[in-house]
Image: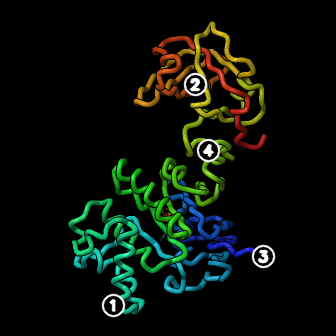
Amino acid sequence: MTERPPAISLRGVRKEFPGGVVAVHGLDLDIADGEFVTLLGPSGSGKTTVLRMIAGFERPTSGTVSLRGRDVTAAPPFERDVHTVFQDYALFPHMSVRRNVEYPLRIAKVPRAQRRERAMEALATVRLDGMADRSPTALSGGQRQRVALARALVGRPSVLLLDEPLGALDLKLREQMQVELQQIQRAAGITFVLVTHDQDEALTLADRIVVFDAGRVEQVGPAREVYERPATPFVAGFVGTSNLLRPDAAHALLGRDGTWSVRPEKIGLTGPADDPPPDTTTAVGTVSEIVYTGATTRCLVALDAPDLAEAARLTVLLVNDGHRRQAPERGESVRLFWRPEHEIPVAAL
Ligand code: ADP
Ligand code: MG
């Protein structure tokens, strides 16, 4: 069996804008057929530029873009089997929902009866078939987002590019749409590349996350791996909360060289005189801050380590499950402990 070429393949892709801004520095990335990939990074890190180069709205300064093994670097957008969903949805307010969804098929000169059928099918996929005759202006934000999605699906592209598609929605709706996006992606078997600056969204949705910072890829991997094994200090800090132990702190607390990370939820907490569980690393300190967030309580603990200037404070995340010890009070002395396997190296020695 011959291996299928990746749905998307980027090789040495670099983008420099006039004025000398390098938005993307030499990017190599393969995305498999049917994969759900998120591009995660702070604002200005080059995510949209990467998406626009895949779609053909932007030409790389150097490097190549291939779709299913075909070099499309110089091909215009309409010659690429991809569809882009923009953040503002870009719906036509003077057309009904159904006609909005039909629009790409009309451009492609699909006969009327067939395009109507396919539009209704796409609307059913996003559960909006009951609203086909409405104007998009009479819809909620989440419904408009689904119309944009239906319009993207109606042309049956093999790749769907989504640029912060849920950014305008409130939290509850966003979480609901995340579940729907996943279901649609699985059912349609389409390759999804979704840009987000929201780490929870990236972790929730993706088969694989590509973490960007300042136009460079910091790490590529499955959600669990990026979270549990952050490759760089940037990833450790950007994806989830992390206690970053710079070399002096790592040396004093862990007896290790280099920079290390310990996630707040991996740290246990007990009274200062209590024995910690066997085979754990432990440190004693004073609770300096308590933040109750409902399901969890976040405690900031200042360690009794006078020789440590920086990073002498650790964040501990306690789950309010009622089974464990109650969260301590501010000013209380506590003992922290964690298992050595949760000490993650995040930079070269
Ligand atoms: P992100 O989507 O991660 O927020 P972008 O890809 O939009 O980042 O932008 C990356 C960098 O490239 C930013 O510094 C941005 O200002 C710059 N940039 C983007 N588009 C252009 C453009 N058309 N001309 C000049 N600079 C641009
Ligand atoms: Mg962007």
Identified at 56% across, 65% down, the residue is 23
- Residue bearing the label numbered 4: 227
- Residue bearing the label numbered 1: 112
Task: Give the x, y percent position of residue 342.
Answer: 69, 33
Q: CA distance from mark 3 to mark 1?
A: 41 Å
Mark nearer the N terminus (4 vs 3):
3
| Depth check, front residue: 209 or 175 | 175
Between tags 2 and 3, which lies in front? 3
**Which quarter of the picture shows residue 279?**
top right
Q: CA distance from mark 4 to mark 2?
A: 21 Å
Task: Give the x, y percent position of residue 249.
Answer: 69, 27
- Residue bearing the label numbered 2: 313
For label 2, the crowd category at 10 Å Cα-Cα, with few meaning under 14, some 14 to 19 and many 20 or more, is many
| Amino acid bearing label 4 | Tyr
Identify the element where label 4 is drawn.
Answer: helix
Question: Do residues under tags 2 and 1 come within 8 Å of each other at their CB atoms?
Answer: no
Q: Which residue, as the protein is rendered here, is positioned at the far top?
A: 273
